[in-house]
Amino acid sequence: MRRLLPAAALLLIGAREPVLVPDVSQRTIDIVTSFSGADLLLFGAILYPQGRVPDERIDVAVVVKGPSQSILVREKQKLAGLIWANAGSARFRSAPSFYAVASSRPLKQIVDAKTAAIYELGLGNLQLSPATAALPEERLRFESGFVDLRRRGEYYTARPGSVEISQDVLYRARVTIPPRVPTGRYTAETFLIRDGKVVAAAERVIEVRKSGFERFVTVAAARQPLLYGLAAVILSIGLGWAAGAVFSRRA
């Protein structure tokens, strides 16, 4: 027997597909000197047409992405068994600076390969847009190496089975933002998946920004680069002189 949903779902009378109502615990993340990362909670509700939950099983995947960057990846090779040197490189035009995906079940179990590629669901489906010509196997090697480096630095993460769904209506997931993420506009995307297809999607924006003294320094460097450079030089000279004076007294 189909279950009735709360009265708010009655607003969907006439709709053919479910609607996601997502939110995040923080719309703004401030980076200060003591910033050690953030624990971001993504949550929301699924509103069904006519307020009735379908008999088919539903799944949810959430993706948090940071601003895209142009990245140069270098491959190192040991020469003569003695020293490491650059052996090759590849540039990617639009690699996300941060990428985290969480899902109610492993992605391969809930979404087909074509849909996963379209929505960039999973670390193996990132559209990095290579800017350098290379053979397919070489490009894949650089892509795999780049993703592996980002995973080890915790800038790219995948957490299958970490999205909790309550009564097929409410969902929640947690994503950890590491300490050294770049600032900018982040997106939190939620996908409702049924029978291997995305049937609903929604997005929230998160602003990661520097705050306090860090923000002052960043703004000063951008708006007054000459004065900022002079101040940095004067400060360096002053600190060097002070350190020299202290050590000369101790001697």
Image: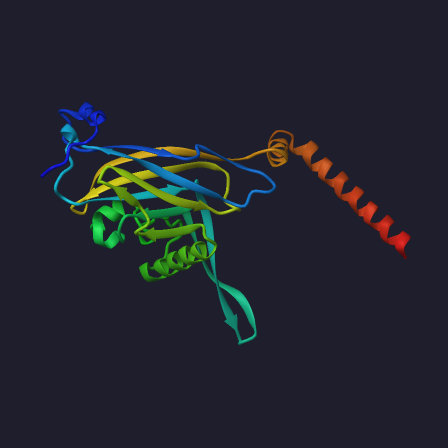
Residue in view at x 79 percent, y 47 percent: 240
> Where is residue 44 drawn, in percent x and y?
31, 35
Whether residue 15 sits left or right of residue 89 in the image: it is left
**In the image as oriented, which residue stretches furthest toward the bottom?**
81
Residue in view at x 87 percent, y 48 percent: 245
* Quadrant, the C terminus: bottom right
Q: Count numbered badges in the picture.
A: 0
Q: Is residue 96 visible?
A: no
Q: Is residue 51 visible?
A: yes
Toward which corner of the image does residue 143 lie, by quadrant? bottom left
| Colour scheme in use | rainbow
Whether residue 83 sits left or right of residue 231 in the image: it is left
Q: Nearer the viewer, residue 114 or 34?
A: 34
* Quadrant, the N terminus: top left
Residue in view at x 20 percent, y 25 percent: 7
Whether residue 118 sits left or right of residue 147 in the image: it is left
**In the image as oriented, which residue stretches furthest toward the left?**
1
> Where is residue 21 drawn, in percent x and y?
29, 31
Q: Nearer the viewer, residue 75 or 113?
A: 113
Residue in view at x 75 percent, y 40 percent: 235
Toward which corner of the image does residue 12 lie, by quadrant? top left
User: Height in image: 157 above or below 44?
Assistant: below
> Where is residue 72 drawn, in percent x and y?
47, 52
> Where is residue 234 drawn, in percent x and y?
77, 39
Toward which corner of the image does residue 119 lie, by quadrant? top left
